[in-house]
Image: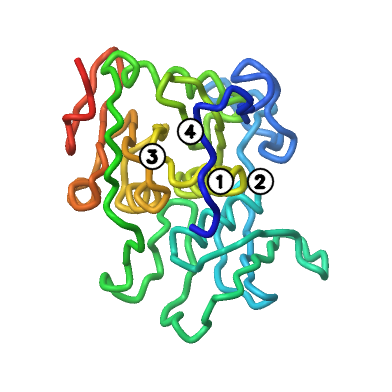
Amino acid sequence: MGVPPKDMADGDQVSEVVAGGAEGAAPPYSAVRVEVARLPDGGRAHDAVAVEEPLEIRIGGEPVAVTMRTPGHDEELALGFCLSEGLAPEDASLPDDFAANAVDVRAPSFDPARLRRSFYTTSSCGVCGKGALEAVAVEAPRVESRLRVAAALVADLPERLRAAQAAFAATGGLHATGLFRADGQLLCAREDVGRHNAMDKVVGWAFRERLLPLAEAILCVSGRLSFELVQKAAVAGCPVLVAVGAPSSLAIELAEDRGVTLCGFVRDGRANVYSEAWRIEA
């Protein structure tokens, strides 16, 4: 991944949880107030809705992708996206021209000629716009981590993530991804209108913190498990991926192929383990 991993057991590791938790105010860039009509009484009121805006990801000043996202942690998003696409990023920053809704990624080994499709994505599906299924490649080795996690901890992770979802509490319209240590400590939580963007932001944060590969960590997402979320977890080297929702068949196939433990329908103290179940200890 370009940087050596940092020991995740270090006592000086600082958590990057959303300030204030779910009971605190949503970050100002993540929500806006709009006027709505309340039915059936027809009264007028104001409501908070999630912000969705385009982000142009550039490499060396050249656009390579556009994604619809919730503003905030854009550099992390760009890094996570480029990592999952095998573009070998080194860092990301605001562009020299200070263009709004743009991030410039530094990736010296990037070869524009290898891009044979548009990277256009939407907030609902990160693989939209890919020219063919063959283009959906996972550029990551099989996850060989021997991490084992207690089933009781897995069952508790969605609630721990929910407690950090300040913007969701305000709008009800955002997905979230949380990165947890093996002991259950939340290291980083990110929210976004796109589930794949929330994952990219967390992976990008971990990359900047020199934590990759995430061999001793757990990722938890607030929605369903898609192929692309498993792909991103595998690229990050994370052995356990937890979700409150259901996995797709392709997500399960990819998890089995890459050695990722996939836990779905994690709620009310229960979980379904679809792959590599030996990592979950009752």
**Which numbered disc flags the more N-terminal residue, 1 or 3?**
1
The quadrant of the image that shows the C terminus is top left
Comparing 180 with 49, the one in front is 180
Ranked by sequence position, the earlier of labels 1 and 2 is 2
Q: Is residue 49 above or below residue 207?
A: above
**Horizontal relation, residue 251 to residue 3: left or right:** left
Q: Secondary structure at mark 4?
A: strand
**x 55%, y 32%: residue:** 189
The residue at which mark 4 appears reads as: 179
| Marks 1/2: CA–CA distance | 7 Å
Can you tell which quarter of the image residue 97 is in? bottom right
Instruction: Single out the mark in the foreground, 2 or 3.
Output: 3
Given this view, does label 4 or label 1 mark the residue nearer the observer? 4
In the rendered image, the vertical position of residue 127 relative to residue 230, given as above or below: below
Q: Position of residue 144 (x, y in %)?
A: 27, 44
Q: Are marks 2 and 3 in contact (CB under 8 Å)?
A: no
- Quickly name the residue at label 1: 201
Expressed as whole percent of the image width and height from the top left, the position of residue 28 reads 74, 35
Question: Do the CB atoms of the residues marked 4 and 1 lie less than 8 Å apart?
Answer: no
Q: How is the image coloured?
A: rainbow
Q: Amino acid at mark 3?
A: Ala
Q: Earlier in the sequence, mark 4 or mark 3?
A: 4
Location of mark 2 (residue): 73
- Report the residue at 65% width, 59% height from top: 91
Q: Which residue is mark 3?
A: 215
Residue that lies at the very extreme toward the bottom in this rendered image: 113
The amino acid type found where label 1 is placed reads Lys
